Structure formats: structure tokens, C-alpha cells
Image (cartoon, rainbow, N blue to C red):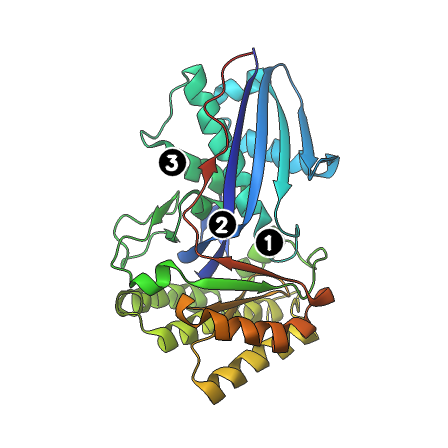
Amino acid sequence: MSLTFRWQSPSNIALVKYWGKRDPQLPSNPSISFTLDACHTQTHATFEPGQGIQVLLNGEDAPNFVPKISQFIERIGHRHAWLGDYSLKVDTVNSFPHSSGIASSASGLSALALCVVDAALALGAPLQESDARREASILSRLGSGSASRSVYGGLVVWGATHSVPGSHDEYAVPYPHAVHPMFRTFRDVVMLVDVGQKAVSSTAGHALMERHPFAQQRFNQAHQHLSDLQSILRDGDLMPFLDLVESEALTLHGLMMSSQPSYILMRPNTLHIIEAIRAHRLSTGMPIGFTLDAGANVHVLFPAEVEQKAMDFVKQILAPFTKNGRYIVDQVGTGPVPLTDQAKPK
């Protein structure tokens, strides 16, 4: 008997950054993210009696990803022992460049986790969480911390913090406080400065925080920023929102530049884009800002109400700084969607 499931799960972009972790895949500080829409992964997972793992990425055999999936299956084995009796074929397609500072691990592993939960339910295996989506968030976290946030849409919090009731280190939760409608349709245009492999993996980057001289100050800052965001998100305070989010992005890269060993993941054109955005905001008053993930690409953020003018700026001023003029137009999304009905045994 084989079971096949297919999910589309989005990437997400952290506004308050998670940087630093402890075993087993628990965050050193809380984070909050926008779930994206256009940047997603479609994963087709087939479970058959037997042993072994096969991974296809964008239609091609990808043996280099087998160890990562094997590690994921091993990590979740204590919650899903039935996986020990099944082989797994993962056929996954990204809508965006892999390993370039857009969270492909978040979208890919959350999609796979959702497939695992569906398979468990189809087999009658008990879930440790009564809520299937929370179970998927826990499983996702064990594969990639930021993946825990991708199982929900909109604004999502991962990591226990006093300002967010129900927040937890083991799973993400939808942001529970009031949110101005403007932030539910926020735009994110990803400027593809560099689409190659990052200089340092996220796992190695998080490990740098274990001995970082500014670690505790950073963790305290993240809690404070999440608290500060509460009134900003409620009232639709755009400029304070952009100031805080930009501060978080630059702090992340500052931590990497001041770690031992140190890493500079920005590229010259990353800085050109940042400087152009700030100059444009200052000269026009347009509420347009940026954030960065752990890579060279720049996420340009703005509300839907200024989309036409913002996109003119993106095309005319920012696009020449990207690789071959490439960028991805995205926005806050509603979360994962199943692409097939629950699979029937074959």
C-alpha cells in the first residue's frame, strides 16, 4: 500500500529575526514573520512500505538533499514511529531560486511536514497534538526553525515571549493581536541580487550566536521589538514599522559581521538598493522600506495603496542592481494549501 500527498506551502520573511538556537531546534529569541504567497514550494510525497529516501528537486534527482530529509525523518521519528516502516519519495518544486536568502527550507520542510501529518491521519496513527496544523508546525521546526511559521498565513509568531499570549518555543502561532488591514495585504518585492549558494548555511549562522559577545543583548532586543510591534501593527503606523523592521535586518547582518568567524553576506548591490530605498523614502515620503534574510537579496516592503508608484521605483531604480534585472513580486499570503484530496491507498 502506498500513500501520496501533495501540499503547496509558502516561504516567509521574518520581521523580527530568529538568530540563535538550542537543542532540539528551539529558538534563542522569538520572531514574527509575514507569510508570503508567490514564493512557495509544491511538494509531492509518496510513502510506501520499505526503506529508503529519494528526492527530486524541480524534476531532477537531487541526492544532495537526501541527508537533510533523512535527518528530518530521524528527528520526527519519536512522534511518528510509523515512518520507520515506509520509504519516502519527495518530489518538490520551488517557485523561486533555492539557497539564496529566500527561505526554501521553510517552504519545503513545512510542505513535507503537512504531507507527513496527512499520511499519519490516513494510516490512523495518533497525533501527539490534537490540532493537526500545530503538529505540522512542531514537525516543521524539527526540520528548519523558520519552517514552523510557514504552516500559517499572515503574521506568525514563533518563540515564547511575554507580549504574545500562547506563543511557544516548540511551535508557531498566528499573531493573536489586532492588526490594521493594511498589514494583511502588504507587498514584498524580492530583489534577486544573488541567486547562488549562501556563503554560510543558516545552521552554521545560528551556531555563531553560542559564543557571540552581543548575544544576550540581541535576544533581549527581539523580545522588546515584538512588544513594540503590538501598537504599530494595531494602529497601522507605517514609518515606525519600517524603522523597526529595517533595524532588525541590519542587526542580523551586523551580528554575522561581528561573529567569529565573521561573514559578510551583503553584496555591493545590496547596499545600493538599501541606500536608494532610504533616499527615496526621505525625498518623497513614500512608506517603502526593506528587510533582508541571511543573504544578499533585498525584500522591498510597502503597503498595497502605494503599489503603482512603488513598482515604478522598483523597475526604474532598483531592478538595474539585481542579477539580470530579476525580482519576484510577492505579498502577504494566506498559508499552505493542499493540492490533492486525501490520498487513497493504491
Query: Callout 1, which amino acid?
Result: Ser
Query: Callout 2, which amino acid?
Result: Ser
Q: Position of residue 132 (x, y in %)?
A: 37, 31
Observer-side mark, 3 or 2, equals 3
Image height of 343 relative to 24, above or below: above
Give the quadrant of the C terminus: top right
Q: Which residue is mark 3?
A: 133
Image height of 326 relative to 167, above or below: below
Give me the C-alpha separation between circle 1 and circle 2: 10 Å
Mark found first going from the N terminus, 3 or 1: 3
Query: Callout 3, which amino acid?
Result: Arg
- Name the residue at 70% across, 58% down: 195
Disc 2 crowd, CA 10 A, few/some/many (<14, 14-19, 20+):
many
Residue 129 falls in image quadrant: top left
Give me the C-alpha separation between circle 3 and circle 2: 15 Å
- Name the residue at 50% across, 42% down: 9
Q: 38 left or right of 163?
A: right
Numbered circle sitting on residue 202: 1
Image height of 50 relative to 132, above or below: above
Q: Are dots 1 and 2 in contact, CB under 8 Å?
A: yes
| Front in this rendered view, residue 44 or 151 | 44
Give the quadrant of the N terminus: top right
Q: Are dots 3 and 2 in contact, CB under 8 Å?
A: no
Numbered circle sitting on residue 146: 2
